[in-house]
Image: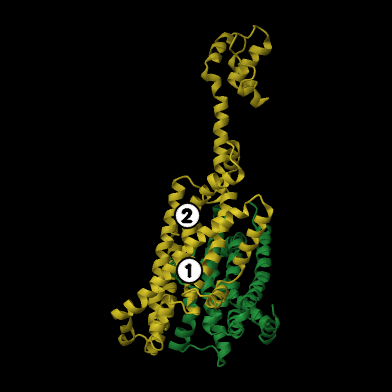
Chain colours: A yellow, B green
């Protein structure tokens, strides 16, 4: 963010600097007024008194409420992101399958799960699992609902990751005799997975945040524990603590995501479509160069060049816009001045096929 | 299978009205988040450091906090602890609190979507705007933001879809008439038809969300600035 805004405006001159200073003063004033109003309201309602905040410094609040709640939030989120990976791989590959019924089935399931609000899934699963003998239905309702939603997102990530790979990957896999399924599982999906790492970290943040929906179905996660602890008088303070914990964790995970996407780029793994298109272009251009290069490698043409010095002057070659090695070969072969010697001026050498 | 209980519970509860509540919640909070997001992104690209800082703070805080916390806080902190009221009628008050909570939360996502849109605008556009003598506000209003909006249709659309689904969390701000509250009540009434009741609401959301997704894909291709 620090580099980006400077692109949108010039280095300020003296007049603009003054304007920016006034702007800053006004900005600070507005923020101060808003903050002051909020603080006044808090003070006016007695929320700032030390007595109200004492509750969050008591050890028992942490050992009995915040930390168990945080633990439940993290277990639900981590378990569901692992489940979502498995679900997403299965359904992402199924959506790429050559078997139409399988592809359609996977597409319908993924689109359905992406369209239904997670909270509705949780409420449904809570009651549904409560009718079975499964222990701890609220925990499993949270986990399964999060797997269903995040898994369908991961399935889309897998699919788009595979589709955005360079075509050559699939073609090369076919060329060495892999079946389509093998090409997917051995060549394409592993590459898509690596490029997905930053998106997966982002999905973990989503799972952590969405696990707070579990408070509606009596899952003892961080927010529910905080409201339980704070009710009826200290909800502001306890919810504040829960918010700060969430923000710190998610901010850290966000940084981890940025770090992993930098790491991926450093390894030459492309995370966006524009970059993905660059590889084949580079490959082709260097391949073309290599095809034109060998002409001089063998050294034949250097020899012929010397022989032809008298017949054609280099300036004329230049005017005809004939590449050096090529032009000499032309002059040699079509001029009929001498029989081509054995092993020289191969008629089907790469340059000819390339230009004609 | 005996479906009479299902039909009864379907007639007994205002299912269609529940969806309508979610749609109006989406409309008002979407409008609010669009305004907040636009202001935030304008602040974030501005040359004024204090505004940039404030907007960055807002976006980062509301992006990293769970929506459920925001919605619970709108009820138990803003209303209960701080006594902030927008209407004498309970239901209207909770509705407005829910709209504000949803708007604040999604405003940060709108700001991020627009920022990715701003990044699609070539540097030359900003330079050309400066070269013909436009001030920062003029170039943002006339040159950069219109192109940013068009470049941000896809991420904005994703935010809209998230918002449609997230309006169900309004039940945490005591809005009882929207779908998750109504569904929970119906399930409580007839737990034997839990699957059918869930499928009714789920398909309702599919009917709303899938066309919106198709429309957004279409729009993002149509409105994209050719470069």
Vertical side of A7 occupied by A177: above or below: above
Q: Considering depth in this image, is A288 or A323 the residue closer to the camera? A: A288
Q: Quadrant of residue A256?
A: bottom left
At horizontal 55% and vertical 81% (from top left) the residue drawn is: B171
Which residue matches tag 1?
Answer: B63
Which residue matches tag 2?
Answer: A197
Label 1 crowd bin: few (<14), some (14–19), many (20+), radius 10 Å? many
At horizontal 61% and vertical 44% (from top left) the residue drawn is: A180
At horizontal 68% and vertical 56% (from top left) the residue drawn is: A101
> Disc 1 vs disc 2: which is toward the camera?
2
Name the spot of residue A6 as percent of width and height, x first.
46, 57
Say whether residue A11 is left or right of residue B38.
left
Vertical side of A334 occupied by A289: above or below: below
Chain containing mark 1: B
Q: Where, quadrant-wise, is the C terminus of chain A in this rendering?
A: top right
Q: Considering depth in this image, is B9 or B213 the residue closer to the camera? A: B9
Name the spot of residue A307 as percent of width and height, x first.
57, 8
Name the spot of residue A291 as percent of width and height, x first.
57, 26
């Amino acid at each position: 963010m620090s580099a980006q805004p400077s692109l949108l405006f010039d280095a300020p001159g003296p007049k603009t600097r003054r304007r920016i200073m006034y702007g800053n003063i006004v900005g600070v004033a507005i923020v101060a007024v808003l903050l002051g109003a909020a603080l006044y309201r808090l003070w006016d309602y007695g929320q700032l008194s030390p007595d109200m905040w004492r509750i969050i410094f008591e050890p028992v609040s942490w050992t009995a409420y915040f930390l168990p709640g945080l633990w439940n939030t993290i277990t639900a989120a981590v378990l569901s992101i692992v489940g979502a990976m498995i679900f997403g791989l299965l359904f992402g590959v199924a959506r790429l399958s050559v078997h139409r019924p399988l592809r359609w089935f996977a597409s319908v399931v993924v689109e359905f799960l992406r369209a239904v609000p997670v909270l509705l899934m949780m409420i449904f699963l809570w009651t549904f699992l409560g009718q079975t003998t499964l222990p701890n239905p609220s925990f499993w309702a949270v986990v399964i609902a999060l797997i269903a939603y995040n898994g369908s997102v991961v399935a889309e990530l897998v699919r788009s990751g595979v589709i955005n790979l360079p075509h050559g990957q699939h073609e090369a896999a076919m060329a060495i005799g892999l079946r389509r399924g093998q090409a997917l599982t051995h060549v394409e999906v592993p590459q898509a997975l690596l490029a997905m790492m930053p998106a997966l970290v982002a999905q973990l943040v989503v799972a952590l945040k969405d696990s707070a929906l579990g408070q509606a179905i009596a899952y003892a996660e961080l927010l529910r524990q905080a409201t339980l602890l704070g009710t009826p008088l200290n909800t502001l303070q306890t919810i504040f603590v829960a918010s700060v914990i969430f923000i710190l964790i998610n901010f850290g995970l966000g940084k981890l995501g940025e770090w992993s996407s930098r790491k991926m780029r450093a390894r030459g793994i492309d995370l966006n479509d524009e970059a993905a298109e660059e590889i084949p272009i580079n490959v082709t251009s260097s391949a073309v160069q290599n095809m034109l290069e060998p002409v001089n490698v063998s050294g034949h043409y250097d020899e012929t060049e010397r022989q032809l010095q008298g017949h054609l002057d280099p300036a004329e070659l230049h005017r005809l816009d004939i590449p050096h090695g090529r032009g000499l070969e032309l002059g040699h072969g079509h001029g009929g001045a001498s029989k081509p010697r054995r092993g020289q001026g191969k008629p089907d050498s790469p340059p000819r096929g390339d230009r004609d | 299978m005996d479906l009479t209980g299902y039909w009864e519970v379907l007639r007994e509860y205002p299912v269609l009205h529940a969806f309508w509540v979610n749609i109006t919640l989406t409309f008002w909070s979407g409008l609010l988040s669009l305004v907040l997001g636009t202001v935030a992104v304008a602040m974030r690209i501005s040359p004024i450091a204090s505004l940039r800082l404030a907007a960055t703070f807002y976006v980062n805080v509301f992006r990293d906090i769970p929506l459920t916390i925001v919605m619970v806080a709108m009820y138990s902190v803003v209303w209960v602890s701080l006594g902030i009221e927008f209407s004498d009628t309970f239901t209207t008050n909770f509705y407005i609190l829910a709209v504000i909570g949803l708007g604040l939360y999604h405003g940060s996502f709108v700001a991020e979507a627009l920022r990715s849109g701003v990044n699609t605008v070539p540097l030359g556009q900003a330079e050309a705007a400066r070269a013909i003598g436009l001030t920062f506000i003029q170039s943002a209003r006339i040159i950069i933001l219109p192109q940013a909006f068009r470049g941000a249709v896809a991420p904005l659309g994703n935010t809209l879809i998230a918002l449609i689904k997230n309006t169900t969390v309004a039940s945490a701000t005591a809005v009882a008439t929207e779908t998750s509250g109504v569904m929970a009540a119906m399930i409580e009434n007839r737990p034997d038809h839990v699957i059918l009741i869930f499928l009714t609401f789920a398909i309702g959301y599919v009917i709303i969300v899938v066309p919106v997704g198709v429309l957004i894909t279409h729009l993002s291709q149509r409105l994209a600035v050719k470069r």
